[in-house]
Structures are given as structure tokens and as C-alpha cells.
Amino acid sequence: MAVRKVAITLPEELYELVERARVVEHRSRSEVIQEALRTHFGEAVYRPSEAERAALIAGLEEAHVDPTSVREWSDVRPQLRARR
């Protein structure tokens, strides 16, 4: 699949939402924004369970209170794969 780079301008509050989600979900800005666009245009996307949603909210709150609690994706990914 071909890809193209685009530059966008976001209001500060949207930028902060993207950044918080990116850090907690260990994803790139592009991945977060691509998912938002897919959702907007109706393409099926992953929907977290209530337990996953609660964990994400807790992680966002923890990252906001203590930014040093954020871990690198390379450290988290093996743990997530082991849960499958």
C-alpha cells in the first residue's frame, strides 16, 4: 500500500489528546490519527473491552500525574504478546 505524508494543524486540545493516547497506547501519532480517520469514515477498527478501556483511562491518568511512569514500547510489547 502506498503512503503519503501530510501536514495538519491541530488545536492544542486535540494535539494533547493525540499525545496522551500515543504515549499510553505506545503508538505513533500517525497510528492514532489514522485510527481516528478510519473511525470517522466508517472503516472497522479495534474496539477495546470495558476492562481495556478502564486500563487505558487509568494509564492516561497515571501518565498525566507521573510522566516518569511511561514505559517504552519495546519494554511493553513482549508483555502484551505473552498475554495472548
Image (spheres, rainbow, N blue to C red):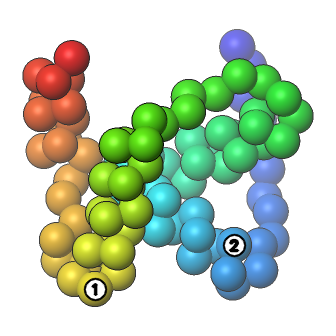
In the image, taking residue 34 as reference, residue 71 lies left or right, namely: left
Choose the circle earlier in sequence order: 2 or 1.
2
The numbered dot on residue 65 is 1
Residue 68 location (% of width, % of height)? 17, 77
Residue 9, disc? none
Name the residue nearer the viewer: 75 or 24. Answer: 24
Position of 67 relative to 52 (above/below): below
Q: Quadrant of the N terminus?
A: top right
The label nearer to you, 2 versus 1, is 1
Which residue occupies 15% across, 24% down? 83
Q: Residue at x 69, y 72 (%)?
A: 14
Measured as percent of width and height from the top left, residue 22 is found at: 46, 57
Label pair 2/1, CB-CB below 8 angstroms: no
Q: Secondary structure at mark 2?
A: helix
**How packed is label 1: few (under 14 Cα within 10 Å), some, or many (20 or more)?**
few
| Vertical side of 81 occupied by 16: above or below | below
Residue extending furthest right?
41
> Which amino acid type is shown beneath numbered disc 2?
Leu
Q: Quadrant of the C terminus?
A: top left
Question: Can I make out residue 2 in this image?
Answer: yes
- The quadrant holding residue 18 is bottom right
Q: What is the three-letter code of the residue carrying label 1?
A: Val
Badge 1 element: helix
Residue indicated by mark 2 = 14
Instruction: Please report the residue visible at 72 percent of the width from the left and 28 percent of the height from the top.
Output: 3
Q: Is residue 23 visible?
A: no
Cα–Cα span, label 2 and label 1: 19 Å
Res 43 quadrant in image: top right
Q: Position of residue 59 (x, y in %)?
A: 30, 63
Q: Residues within 10 Å of mark 2 (few under 14, many from 20)?
A: few
